Image (tube, rainbow, N blue to C red):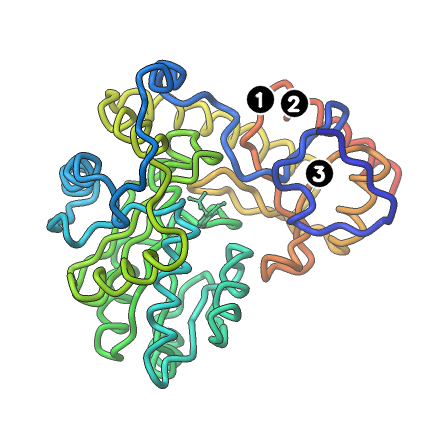
Amino acid sequence: MVVTVTHRVISPGMFIGVEDADVVSFGSGQPDLAPPFDVGEVFLNFSRFKYGKVGGEDELKAKLRGYVKREFGHCVDEDCIMVTNGASEALDLVLRKVSLDPGRRRVLLTKPYYYSYPHLARINHMTPMYTDANIDLEDVKEKSGNCDVMIVNSPANPTGNVIEKSVLRGIQEITEDNGCILISDEVYHSLTYESKHYSPKGENVVTVNSFSKTYSLCGYRIGYVFCQNPGFMKDICEIKAHTSMNTNLLSQRVAMECLCVPKRHVLKNREIFQRRRDYIYRRVKELGFEVEKPEGAFYVLPKVGDSMSMARDLFFEHRVTVYPGERLGASGHVRLSFALPQDKIDEGMGRIDEYVAKL
Ligand SMILES: Cc1ncc(COP(=O)(O)O)c(C=O)c1O
């Protein structure tokens, strides 16, 4: 689709699903790499058209049960796992469930944050509160005492931070003591470049995950959520029954196939992203911007000053998309995704070079 923009106004939503041949997009948070097998094969043999089970297909849930044990060390029964329309629906369902309980009205977020978190909180009549993404456990202790939910996201969008295991454990203990639900959003779990991913565990932890990034299936809208509490899962399943109902059956079939593919596919993709990370980090530094080396996910977040005008000028004058940090709790920064082919990264960095040279 070709996008024609008549006003010089930009917003993150404006770029979702949009492709334009002359634009280099560092905006998109979706892998350019192919899924791990020929998805078309699944279509040919698929002929189920009726509603499926709201919580997900038994076969997929059984597979996921083994997967979350192997990958993250979580032991959960199948009635504690639910398949969702991406991590997005899982996050929304959990917040909806919490917001239905009396008095449950505050969500603690790390800042900068994934741009949908504050919106999801508000849509569910909850107030977002913030603690710094460079976690200070004392601050978490104080603030989570006044919150009903905290969301952690490691590896993180948009910083690329990976929260240390000891810190995640600290957060888990503090939130448990404070009677606060800890949502752990782990959609970038397969993309850590320096250390191993750690998935928080405990009675109060609800884990949200997805096939979008790990298996390049963003458009198939397939994710999952699990926790230790079957009652909690039953409640969110009830909400899903009255909202989206079952998750797309074809997507669930594709997800099943993904879990059968040897792990080396995921590791190979991680290597590709790591090479791109090294490259883009070097180029951004050479431009003279202050930037932290991302330890995971596929974003860099340089400090650039007036990020709104930079994003606007790059888009309208150089046909390059970057996200202004204002929308991500990171004013003065722009987010560049490196989920695009190396030649496009090269081309885009060249255009940003030209923009900087003109300043
Ligand atoms: C941190 C984070 N959580 C959740 C999502 C949504 O993932 P999904 O495609 O599974 O809905 C994204 C997508 O970019 C994300 O960056």
Picture quadrant of residue 50: top left
Mark with earlier residue (3, 1): 3
Q: Secondary structure at mark 1?
A: loop
Task: Count neighbours of disc 2 (C-alpha within 10 A) and say few if under 14, some if 14 to 19, many if 20 or more.
Answer: some
Q: Is residue 47 above or below residue 41?
A: below
Q: Nearer the viewer, residue 332 or 28?
A: 28
Q: Secondary structure at mark 3?
A: strand
Task: Count neighbours of disc 1 (C-alpha within 10 A) and say few if under 14, some if 14 to 19, many if 20 or more.
Answer: some
Task: Please name the amino acid that badge 2 sits on.
Answer: Lys
Q: Locate residue 299, reporting x and y percent.
A: 54, 41
Tag on residue 341? 1
Tag on residue 344? 2
Q: Verify CB contact (< 8 Å) between mark 2 and mark 1.
A: yes
Tag on residue 321? 3
Q: Locate residue 191, reporting x and y percent.
A: 38, 36
Please name the residue shown 32% across and 56% down the image.
241
Q: Residue furthest front?
A: 50
